[in-house]
Image (cartoon, grey):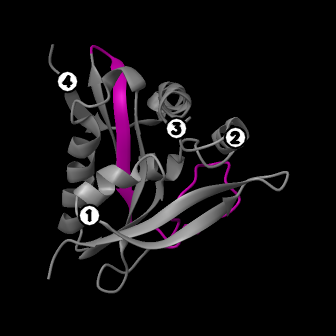
């Protein structure tokens, strides 16, 4: 069966949230506590409709089923979805700022098939085409090994505040894509 790549649309939002939920619960349990995952699914791990509106969020699908999603942003927000309190929607300057690699999730039954790497390359190429020379992200602990293999370097370890005194450890990573 053939998979297809396309830009996400507003009509995809319910399916995207289901994909994100399945990915977090199925793939991140070794890196995060149940409380961290549950609280993050309410705020940080939610759909960011700004990425969809900007046309910078992609899905890989097969027969209408979403297998993975991810994208990039030309806005200052490093991570988080529509329900996250820390949002900076101002546009970045490609000559000075790093494009943000954002919101990568793969359904657990489709892991280890290159979907995440493929989406990452699509996002990187799109950011490069938009004039960005540097990329950065707030990577989940689960995603760090993939991003290290893809040439990203660790910049800092951060704690994203959730609620009830719980925080989500993430790793800010960056990569130069042009000289």
Q: Which residue is mark 1?
A: 127
The spot of residue 166 in percent (x, y) is 77, 53
Q: Please, is residue 126 above or below residue 2 in the view? A: below
Residue 84 quadrant: bottom right
| Spatial separation of the CA atoms under disc 4 and disc 1 | 23 Å
| Spatial separation of the CA atoms under disc 3 and disc 4 | 24 Å
N-term-proximal mark, 1 vs 3: 3
The residue under the point 47% across, 33% down is 27
**Quick check: marks 1 and 3 in contact, CB under 8 Å?**
no
Residue 3's tag is 4
Could you tell me which quadrant the N terminus lies in? Answer: top left
| Label 4 SS | loop
Q: Is residue 84 left or right of residue 125?
A: right
Magenta stretch bounds: 63-90
Residue 28's tag is 3
Q: Which residue is mark 2?
A: 42
**Quick check: marks 4 and 1 in contact, CB under 8 Å?**
no
The residue under the point 33% across, 16% down is 64
Task: In the displayed orientation, state which residue is furthest to the front.
Answer: 30
């Amino acid at each position: 069966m053939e998979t297809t790549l396309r830009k996400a649309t507003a009509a995809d939002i319910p399916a995207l949230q289901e994909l994100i939920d399945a990915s977090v619960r199925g793939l991140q349990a070794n890196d995060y506590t149940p409380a961290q995952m549950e609280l993050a699914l309410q705020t940080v791990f939610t759909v960011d409709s700004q990425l969809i509106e900007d046309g910078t969020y992609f899905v890989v699908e097969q027969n209408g089923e979403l297998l993975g999603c991810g994208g990039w942003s030309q806005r200052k927000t490093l991570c988080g979805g529509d329900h996250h309190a820390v949002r900076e929607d101002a546009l970045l300057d490609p000559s000075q700022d790093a494009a943000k690699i954002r919101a990568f999730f793969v359904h657990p039954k489709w892991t280890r098939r290159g979907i995440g790497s493929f989406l990452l390359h699509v996002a990187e190429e799109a950011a490069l085409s938009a004039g960005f020379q540097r990329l950065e992200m707030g990577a989940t602990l689960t995603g760090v090994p993939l991003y290290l293999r893809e040439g990203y370097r660790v910049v800092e370890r951060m704690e994203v505040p959730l609620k009830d005194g719980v925080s989500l450890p993430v790793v800010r990573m960056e990569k130069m894509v042009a000289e």
